[in-house]
Image: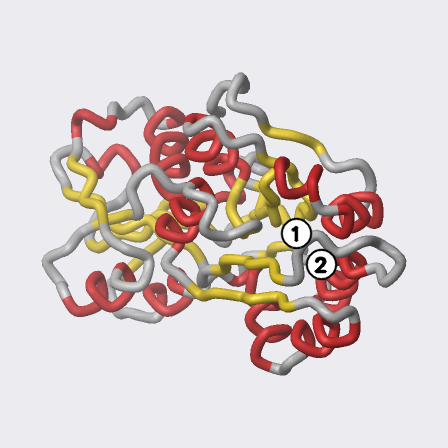
Amino acid sequence: MPKCRSLVAALIVVGLAVTALPHLALARDKFTLAISIYAGWMPWYYAKDQGILKKWAERYKIAIDVVEMDYIPSIEAYVAGKVDAAVMTNMEALDMPARSGVDTSVLIVGDYCNGNDALLVRGIADVKGLKGTEVSLVELSVSHYLLARALEMHGVKESELKVVNTSDSDIGPAFIANKSQKAVVTWNPMVMTIEQTPGVSKIFDSSKIPGEILDLLVVNTKVLNEEARFAEAGKAFGTPYYISPEQTVL
């Protein structure tokens, strides 16, 4: 079974709670975190649904608003400044925010992927067999990166197949229902659901590129600098590192 070494929910929650130190002057009283469906980010759903974040927020007289979104829209909201923080992989952090001129600070490296992202197929023996087929994925996301690495490692060009952009909320049900669909790239928990479908096999996953995919909690650096509580959260997990618009995409 694929593994992703995640920080426990309690550690994450305590880390965010450190932002609310009572002795610091409060320039704002509300912060927003955007989350999306992925196995390594489920502790945030638990903390939200069980009232853990609400409890910590009330203790320090702030509000922590956790909003659930599809993956790419959550990053777009972060880039647009509609949310203060978001969960995303290092690929997206080095691409969308930086390209738009948004400095980003990584507060938590929650896990690294060792099989949670996968390329699943029907009736295709290997990566070379993707030539001439349609591959469904969330375009320009970590799934696109995984596909690009798989193709590169097997001598196939992306121009030799067709990428079909599909939202992460639709990708699992659509592939399961459409038996003529041959290939899909996605992440857990969707991978585990799709794998249970008869006739579906996995021909490549993130265990083949160890350490390349990191799952992060990121904060807008401007917010981090202006809001002492976010800065304190960074100190709690060590010195934050920064992803600036001058950095290139992986």
Q: Which residue is mark 2?
A: 7
Q: Callout 2: helix, strand or loop?
A: loop
Q: Which mark is residue 27?
A: none
Residue type at mark 2 is Leu
Q: Is residue 211 left or right of residue 206?
A: right
Other-residue count near label 2 (Cα within 10 Å), few / some / many at <14 / 14–19 / ≥20:
some
Nearest the eye: 32 or 43: 32
Residue drawn at x 78%, y 75% as measured from the top left:
59
Ranked by sequence position, the earlier of labels 1 and 2 is 2
CB of mark 1 within 8 Å of CB of mark 2? Answer: yes
Residue 192 in percent (x, y) is at 42, 66
Q: Is residue 27 left or right of residue 22?
A: left
Residue 11 in percent (x, y) is at 77, 62
150 over 13 or under it: above or below = above
Q: Which residue is mark 1?
A: 110
Residue drawn at x 76%, y 52% as measured from the top left:
229
Question: For the N terminus, which image quadrant?
Answer: bottom right
Residue 210 in percent (x, y) is at 58, 38
Q: Quadrant of residue 29?
A: bottom right
